[in-house]
Amino acid sequence: MSWWGKVIGGAFGFAMGGPLGAVLGAALGNYFDQGLDGIGPEGVGTGQGNERVQTAFFTAVFSLMGYIAKIDGRVSRDEISLAEQVMGQMQLRPEQRKLAIKLFEQGKQEDFPYEQVLEQFRRECQRRRNLIQMFLEILTATALADGKMEASERRVLESMAAALGYPAAAYTELLNRLHAQFRFQDDVRPADRLRDAYKVLGVDSSADSAQIKRAYRKLMSQHHPDKLVSKGLPEEMMELAKKKTQEIKSAYETIMSHRGE
């Protein structure tokens, strides 16, 4: 049974417990007759495997997107549009989309326990670095959706990365890559497009072709949809991973074409 099948089947013991289970249960409301009875405060359910991690990812990513969107004091139209875009790319079923929206709304609440949610997500991920990286990319893209990142947003995202065991230098590199990706999609001038292509790959323009190829292959491996799903990315988010790989490939091809290779 898929992670979604477990959730709609009322398998809340499987679907976390703890802060994530509470957030998920509140978003579901009285969708079910049964509640969260019998689930311990530490979120130890009876389920194991990828479905549990996928449930945690879905719950954490949409609720924390709401939290990030509100951290600067207001939720912009661009941030809402990005959340809708993510939902659209995931091709969610109506009931899944409704749940994602409710999770987003929960994250905007003043009493949202984001630190506890993040800590439980870290435990559920069990050091799956590429999955954590994808998680941080989605949240960072939320903060960048309006074209800039407020200091308050960056502080929270850096603290989230640290809490998830993601090194500060690696997060700065991730942020720079995402800035470049946003620009790369809209670049018209060839010189700007080439400049940002290098930044998308995280390499300097003076790098030789072998270095560029290694950076390209590393990023493609990190964002490979099948690999991410095997680590716990919800199947519905494969399209997001595919879009990432397409952007990385486009940047690589732009560089290689300029070099005549």
Image (cartoon, helix red, strand yellow):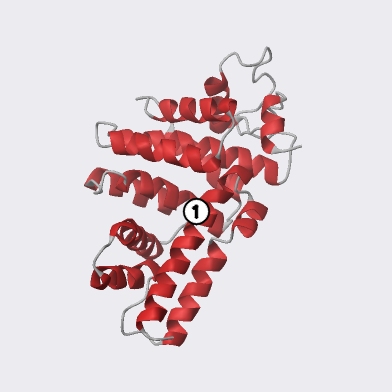
**Residue 160 location in percent, x, y?**
41, 48
Q: Residue at x 35, y 70 (%)?
A: 197
21 relative position to 201: left or right: right
Q: Residue at x 41, y 26 (%)?
A: 105
Q: Which residue is mark 1?
A: 134
**Residue 49 location in percent, x, y?**
72, 46
Quick one: 95 or 7, which is closer to the camera? 95
Element carrying mark 1: helix
- In the rendered view, tell whether residue 137 sits above or below residue 191: above
**Rendering quarter of residue 143:** top left
**Rendering quarter of residue 205:** bottom left
- In the rendered view, tell whether residue 56 sits above or below residue 256: above
63 relative position to 189: left or right: right
**Residue 59 location in percent, x, y?**
54, 35
Quick one: 1 or 188, which is closer to the camera? 188
Q: Is residue 163 visible?
A: no
Q: Quadrant of the N terminus?
A: top right
Q: Quadrant of the C terminus?
A: bottom left
Q: Residue at x 25, y 31 (%)?
A: 74
Quick one: 37 or 54, which is closer to the camera? 54
Q: Residues within 10 Å of mark 1 (few under 14, many from 20)?
A: some
Q: Amino acid at mark 1?
A: Met
**Residue 60 location in percent, x, y?**
51, 38
Q: Residue at x 74, y 37 (%)?
A: 47
Q: Is residue 94 visible?
A: yes
